[in-house]
Amino acid sequence: MTNSAQSDLQVLTLLQSSAQLPAVGKDIGLFSLDDFIQELSIHPYAAAYSTLLPAPTQHALLSQCDNNPAEYFVSMLTAQLVNAAQQVGDMPLYVRMTGADSQARQSLLGAELEAAEVNPLLGQRGVSRYADARFRHSFELECEAIKRARNDAGMKNIELVIPFARTFSEAATVIDLLAEQGLCRGAQGLKVHLQVALPANALLADKFLQYFDGLVIDIDQIAQFTLGLDLAHPALDYLYDRQNDAVIALVKQALDAAMAVDKPCRVMSQFIQSSPNWQAWLQEQGITRVITYAASSDAE
């Protein structure tokens, strides 16, 4: 990292664990619900539909959750949300709702309730999962935790980030689904942002911003989907280039769209701290804050 970049860019942390809280202070760039659910080790479907589980799994779940999986799930997430929101003070706490693929959730207790997918990365995740009536209650539990933190605990600085909204129809759908759960965009100052992870989100960012209050641009995900790579496949590592011209063009298009309508835009990448070129380029675009992982890779 160059000295100038280090002094001009404020580096915020992707919060993935309660253990990170003491170290990060107010510098929380994004609270990841998926990762905190991993910390609970309970699949959201299991919390919502425990009676559908096989008897041994159900017994293990009830033992872990004081015989009330749904309440345990909500109360534990609420407590973590409140802790993080209090820690950032009067700054907004961006909370990314669940968007992990099904494979990433297979280690969780009760994962047998989620069907295996041939291509999990491109499967049911984000808004398509929230909208599935078969498992709507898991989305409702997620919303309940957020409502308790915002309304009961008074953490009005919590703002939402929606992952994997593939189309304008899904953008409209998620705003409606949130409203049905009492999380109305604009009510009591609630802001709802879009995580830009797909090329479609970047290419059509100006139109997506008609549904959202801002953007969180995930450079790593844009690179993955733009170049069509499986990040877990070591034989393809040599192709994974976050500085590919197509990736840069998409990131710029999303940035320009947000700036054109004066809406906030955060940028995240696991590798920003080890990429002086990205740091310098982002500063040229007017970006002053970036989000990265607590343990940043030196992959560049």
Image: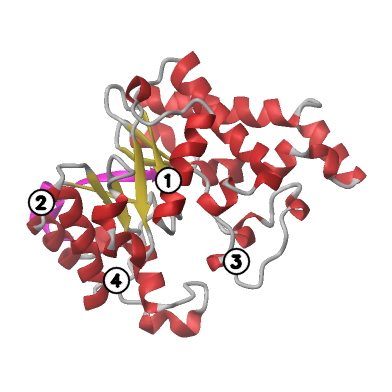
Sequence-wise, which precedes: disc 4 or disc 3? Answer: 3
What is the C-alpha distance between the residues marked 4 and 3?
22 Å
Q: Amino acid at mark 2?
A: Gly
What is the C-alpha distance between the residues marked 1 and 4?
30 Å
What is the C-alpha distance between the residues marked 4 and 2?
19 Å
Query: Would you call the spot at circle 2 few (<14 residues within 10 Å), some (14-19), or many (20 or more)?
Result: few
**Residue receiving disc 1:** 172
Along the line of sight, which residue is nearer the eye, 110 or 195? Answer: 195
What is the C-alpha distance between the residues marked 2 and 1?
29 Å
Q: Amino acid at mark 3?
A: Pro
Sequence-wise, which precedes: disc 2 or disc 1? Answer: 1
Q: Position of residue 97 (x, y in %)?
A: 48, 42
Contact between marks 3 and 2 (CB within 8 A): the answer is: no
Left or right of 66 in this view: 133: left
Residue 222 vs 157, above or below: the answer is below
Residue 28 vs 279, above or below: the answer is above
| Residue depicted at 52% across the width and 38% down the height | 177
- The span shown in magenta is 1-14
| Residue depicted at 82% across the width and 33% down the height | 62
Sequence-wise, which precedes: disc 1 or disc 3? Answer: 3
Query: Would you call the spot at circle 3 few (<14 residues within 10 Å), some (14-19), or many (20 or more)?
Result: some
Asked whether residue 95 is drawn in magenta, I would say no
Along the line of sight, which residue is nearer the eye, 198 or 204? Answer: 204
Quarter of the view holding residue 137: top right
Q: Amino acid at mark 1?
A: Ala
Residue 81 vs 205, above or below: the answer is above
Q: Which mark is residue 120?
A: 3
